[in-house]
Image: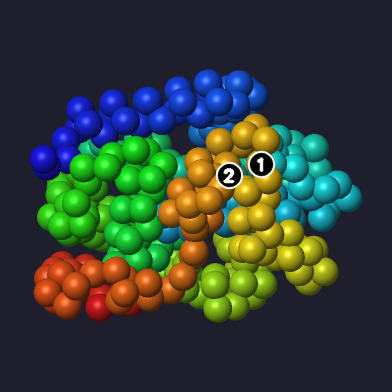
Amino acid sequence: MPVSKRILLRNAVRSKLDLVRRNPSSAWFLFRYYLSDMLCKDACTVVSYPKSGRTWLEQLFIGLACSRSGRTAHAGDTYQHLASKCGMPMIRFTHAGSSWESGSRDAREILRTIHRSYAKKEFVLLVRDPRDVLVSSYYHMVHRTGIPTLEVNDMIDSPLVGLPKLVAFMNHWWDYTLEHGGPDQVVRYEELRANTIATFERICGCVGISAAKTELADAVENANFEKLKARERRSDGSNPWLTALDVKNEASYKMRKGRVGEYREFFSEEQQERIDSYIKATLRDGLGYK
């Protein structure tokens, strides 16, 4: 059965309600998170497509705020809450309407996203190899959102969750970034994985944060991928986005693998050829993923 807006919305709502039923404290986290998002419309903005590394980047900023304030990070922390206590600028982390859990815009609707709603001040565009984004999206939708009928080919062809929508989003925001900022405001997930401290320092500069090397190192250590995964494993559920749905099933973790190039093991040769052909024909050259 092809994935539809109705299926996406139904399962997204159901998965959120299931989280709250299992862990009532997560309701307070979600309320605080979405309220702060509404209240910081004029803040610095980090724009990304789902599964491009936003959660990890947000944890890096949380680690920086903790280092600056001398406190220990907790599962229920949000950056906005910590920033207000240590004099750091507010940052809005947004998928700019591209999430399948909030409206399920298709590839055409993505092109009608109003930029001024998201990028009024300093901003960063966080991107990732679209092939790896598709893999991570598949695992999330099947094992966290709960759409067992989703097929791998949906990640290639579907205008709601597949490659056409992803490429449309990346091109759309790349064009905006070149017009209103510059290529230095584009950060690739692969750079962040390969050279985390230097890349995070560049991101901080883009949103107006000056940080000492020791603070950056502390933040990176605090947001170490394995540490975050262990925190997710032990989570009390207060942060539903860093809570494994099944601690015995790695595929259900938010911080699942974070690997670069996993798509080579996930897609068949024929599927990879189709994906590569589409990317070569449609993705902007400057993004660097052809």
Q: Residue at x 82, y 55 (%)?
A: 67
Image spot of residue 133 (x, y percent)? 35, 60
Quadrant in which residue 164 is drawn: bottom left
Quick check: can you spot residue 193?
yes
Q: Residue at x 86, y 47 (%)?
A: 71
Q: Position of residue 199 (x, y in %)?
A: 59, 71
Amino acid type assigned to the residue bearing label 2 in the image: Leu
**Residue 109, horizontal then vertical, whole percent:** 19, 40
The amino acid type, in three-letter code, at marker 1 is Ser
Q: Residue furthest right?
A: 70
Q: Quadrant of residue 27?
A: top right
Give the total of numbered labels.
2
Q: Which residue is mark 1?
A: 235
Give the residue at mark 2.
Answer: 242
Picture layout, residue 87 above or below residue 133: above
- Which sits in the foreground, 235 or 29? 235
The CA distance from mark 1 to mark 2 is 7 Å
Of 186 and 192, the residue lying toward us: 192
Instruction: Indicate which label's residue lies in the foreground, 1 or 2.
Output: 1
Sequence-wise, the earlier of marks 1 and 2 is 1
Q: Is residue 107 visible?
A: no
- Tell me what residue is drawn at x 19 percent, y 73 percent: 268
* Disc assigned to residue 205: none
Q: Are marks 1 and 2 in contact (CB under 8 Å)?
A: yes
- Where is residue 22, by image quadrant? top right
The C terminus - image quarter:
bottom left
Could you say which is closer to the camera, residue 247 or residue 267?
247
